[in-house]
Every structure is written in C-alpha cells, then in structure tokens.
Image: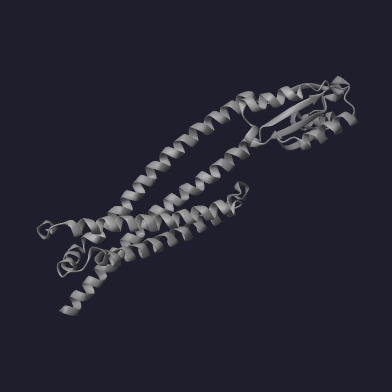
C-alpha cells in the first residue's frame, strides 16, 4: 500500500516538473522567436531600403573620362552602397529585351543617356538625406537628370516606423504574458508543497533554509526549459536559413548569441524570483490559512 502511494506521489511529482518545464520551454521559445524576428526585421528593412535605386543620367557631352571620374568619386562617397554604370547602348539593349522590338531601327539613333544606378546605404534612405544627396549631385554640370522614387522612400520609412512601434508593443505584451504564465506554473508547484513548507517552519527551520531547495529546484527547471528553448530556436534558424538563405538570418552570430543568452538568463531570473516570492507567501501564512 505504501509502495503504491509512493509511486503515485513520484508520478505526480514528475508530472508537475514536466508541466513546469514545458510551460517555461514554450514561453521562452516564443520570446526567443520574437527576439530573433526583431533583430532580423531591421536587417530586412535595411535590405529593402538599399534596393531603392537612384539613377543619375548624364548629358551626351559627358565623355568616358568624366564618367569614370564620377564613378570613382561615388565609390568613395559614404552614402553609396553599390554603383552600376549603364551605358546608353546597354540601356537600349535592355529596352529592346523588354518590349521585344528594336526601337533603334525606327528612330535611327539612340536617344538614351549614359547613367549610374546608385544604391544608397539604408542609414541615408531618409527624405532629408536623399534630398541632400540629390542636391549635391545636381551641382555637377554634366548631369542632366536624377530619378528615384520619392514616394517609395517616404512610404518605406513611415511604414517601418509604424511596424517598429507595433513590434515594441507586442513584445512588451508577450513578455508580460510570459512572466504571468511561468509565475503561475511555479506558484502551483509551490502550492502543492505548502504543508511541507509549514511543517519545516514549525519544527524550527529558518525561512532561508526552507526556501533554498525550492529555489534551486526551480532554477534547474528554468535552466532545462531555457536549454530546450535554445535548441528549438537553433532548429528554427537552421530550417529558415536552409529554405530562405537570401534572408541571411545567421550572418550576425553575435546578436543571435545575445538572444540565446537573454533567453537563458530570463529563464533563470523569472524562475528564481517567482519561486522566492511564492515560497515567501506560504511562509508568512498562518497554518489555518493553508486550508
């Protein structure tokens, strides 16, 4: 009879530990996924910004020397991410490939101009910054026109600000929910041991002595849950990188390691604090209140 009861108690204890570890794992995995999304969302936004091209057209009077010197200056410019020279012959070929007909046969001459496609660094893709770059380039007398999508620049920056604000709000909300879920799981675990806590207190054990084994056990469970969450996050990163390598989500390993460290640290911190205060609550209760 005693053996059956001991087995039942052992199974209940294992089940309690499993539920705590599972809840910690799921919550930390979601938070870690959110953290990885946040650090990569900036990279994705920057990549999108840097795909917006500014095209600089040159007058026909601009010779090869002028064009080469301009290209050399652009390579030294702090705002230039990449530059591509497009000759008017190459531009004519591109137009012919697009429309499917050689328009030069109708016109008799090439009306297009030599140009440079400039992809600006993300930090400079702002309304004021791009306007200053355009103004500076227009001081070159050999430049006939500068073309880029001004509305797209404004739209991208406005939407990125809105998305960033909502990401911060959602992150804060999910973090609050995560704390509540982990805290509730640990409080239930401590609640099932409330009589043991009070019995130890009644025989003269100090509060710190009683609290220590519960805190240490919870920290170990938190570490286990965090370790499982990190392994799951590594699997998620590997899957996304294998199927979408163009995102380059594993390039910045330092930030990824920081996210993993934050997940592990959060798992340990929240389990320690929750167990400390939950145990303290039952230590301060009167014996009659336990029922």
At 20% from the left edge and 65% from the top edge, which residue is drawn?
Answer: 197
Rendered image quadrant of residue 278: bottom left
Q: Tell me if I can see residue 23 in this picture.
A: no
* Occupied quadrant, residue 124: top right
The N terminus - image quarter: bottom left
Give the image location of residue 204, x and y in percent.
17, 69
Question: x, y (%) of residue 196?
Answer: 19, 67
Which sits in the foreground, 52 or 110? Answer: 52
Quadrant containing the C terminus is bottom left
In the picture, measured across the screen, residue 53 lies left or right of residue 45, that is right
In-front residue for pair 207/290: 207
247 above or below 102? below
Residue at the spot 34% in from the left edge and 58% down from the top edge: 272
Image position, residue 116 (x, y; %): 78, 31
The mark tally for this picture is 0
Q: How is the image coloured?
A: one colour
């Amino acid at each position: 009879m005693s053996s059956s009861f001991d087995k039942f108690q052992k199974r209940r204890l294992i089940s309690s530990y499993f539920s705590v570890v599972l809840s910690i794992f799921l919550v930390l995995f979601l938070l870690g996924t959110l953290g990885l999304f946040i650090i990569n969302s900036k990279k994705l936004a920057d990549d999108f910004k840097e795909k917006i091209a500014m095209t600089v057209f040159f007058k026909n009077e601009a010779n090869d020397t002028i064009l080469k010197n301009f290209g050399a200056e652009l390579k030294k410019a702090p705002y230039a991410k990449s530059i591509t020279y497009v000759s008017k012959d190459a531009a004519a070929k591109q137009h012919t490939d697009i429309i499917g007909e050689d328009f030069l046969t109708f016109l008799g001459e090439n009306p297009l101009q030599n140009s440079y496609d400039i992809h600006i660094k993300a930090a400079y893709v702002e309304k004021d910054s791009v306007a200053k770059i355009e103004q500076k380039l227009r001081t070159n007398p050999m430049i006939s026109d500068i073309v880029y999508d001004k509305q797209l620049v404004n739209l991208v920056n406005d939407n990125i600000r809105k998305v960033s604000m909502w990401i911060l709000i959602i992150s804060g909300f999910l973090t609050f929910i995560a704390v509540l879920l982990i805290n509730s799981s640990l409080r239930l675990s401590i609640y099932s041991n409330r009589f043991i806590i009070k019995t130890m207190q009644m025989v003269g054990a100090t509060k710190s002595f009683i609290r220590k084994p519960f805190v240490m056990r919870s920290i170990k469970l938190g570490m286990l849950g965090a370790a499982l969450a990190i392994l799951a996050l590594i699997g998620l990163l590997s899957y996304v990188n294998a199927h979408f390598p163009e995102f380059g989500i594993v390039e910045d390993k330092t930030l990824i390691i920081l996210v993993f460290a934050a997940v592990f640290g959060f798992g340990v911190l929240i389990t320690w604090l929750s167990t400390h205060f939950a145990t303290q609550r039952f230590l301060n209760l009167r014996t009659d209140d336990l029922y």
